[in-house]
Amino acid sequence: MDETLILLKSLLNGSYAEAFAGLKDAQKGVEIGKMWEKHILQISDDFFFYEQIENCNKPFLEAMSKYDDGQDLSDYDFTQDGFSPPHDDLNKRKLAYRHRVIANKYKHGLHNILNQEMMDLWDALYKMTDEYTDGWLSSARALLEQCLSGNEDPTSCNTVAGGVVSSNATGSRHINVLVTSGSLIPSLVKCLLFRLDNLISYENVYSSWDVGKLQCFQWIKERFDSRNTHFCAIGDGWEECEAAQAMNWPFIKVDLRPNSSHRFPGLTFRTVGFYFSIVYGNPDSENDD
């Protein structure tokens, strides 16, 4: 996620501006990064239980679902249930309840959580960031749309729901899956704030914080694998590169430098298709996933 679909660390430490050799105002980038940091933590704490479960990170939201007994949570008081680190089944169930609420909030979006003033601040910050980064956010989002539709024109896509597209023409499915080294809850909040939630469902967000990216990639392969399933990893770090190599998946390394084609704007669906063809060859079946 970070330094691939969105920019945050490179804004905060000035490395994004440094890549432009003085053409970007580094201090403005730092200020933008700090505003994002504030919003991410505030929303994580206020609406997604992060203050309570910060030390209970799981690799994905469904990890605790077997402990959820389906209790109606409409009148449940999460401030008075005595939740503590989930070392026993009772607290594992309480964590599962929180994960269920988080999943529901993710599905319904921030407009059902934030007031109009916060929505306006969020919208203004997104636009300011996209302008400062020459369209990085909107371009990354456009690529995800193109990947879902399997077409350089995302408007040709029939259905987009939570990061899965079914094409009536080919019978194929296209799925965006996110693997991030950050904690799960703030990462879900980032997806919401950076307008990725309708392109990546909560079930498809993985945190490699405790388990590593190779383990996440292995889970993803087990979950989606079939004879015609093709995978491609896109990221900026060595860990996802090594994990992709171990899985024999094509890997596209994102590069911040302004003259690179492997950045946003710059990286296109056509380029992704080229990497697919190197590993999997040209598609000869209309039923590839």
Image (cartoon, rainbow, N blue to C red):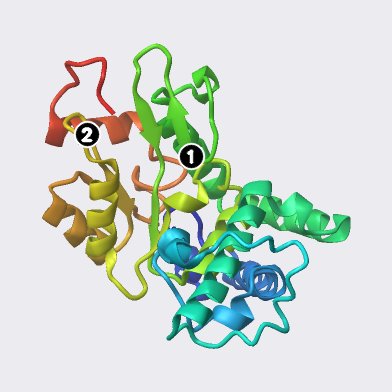
SS for dot 2: helix
In front of the other: 169 or 154: 169
Q: Image check: 72 left or right of 240?
A: right
In front of the other: 77 or 16: 77
* Residue positioned 48% across, 76% down in the render: 92
Give me the C-alpha separation between circle 2 and circle 1: 19 Å
Of pointers 2 and 1, the one earlier in the residue sequence? 1
- Measured as percent of width and height from the top left, residue 254 is found at 34, 52
Few, some or many residues within 10 Å of mark 2 (<14, 14–19, 20+): some
Q: Can residue 19 be seen in this view?
A: no
Labels 2, 1: front one: 1
- Measured as percent of width and height from the top left, residue 201 is found at 51, 47
Residue 276 is marked as 2
- Measured as percent of width and height from the top left, residue 118 is found at 81, 61
- Measured as percent of width and height from the top left, residue 150 is found at 39, 25
State the count of labels.
Answer: 2
SS for dot 1: loop
State the residue position of label 1: 163
* Residue positioned 55% across, 88% down in the render: 84
The answer to whether marks 2 and 1 mark residues whose Cβ atoms lie closer than 8 Å is no
Up-down relation of residue 207 to residue 123 (above or below):
below
Image-quadrant location for residue 174: top left
Q: Which amino acid does label 1 sit on?
A: Gly
In front of the other: 205 or 157: 205
Q: What residue type is labelled 2?
A: Phe
Up-down relation of residue 173 to residue 127 (above or below):
above
* Residue positioned 34% across, 55% down in the render: 255
In front of the other: 205 or 271: 205
Q: Can residue 177 be seen in this view?
A: yes
Q: Image check: 74 left or right of 57?
A: right
Give the residue furthest to the top: 169
Few, some or many residues within 10 Å of mark 1 (<14, 14–19, 20+): many
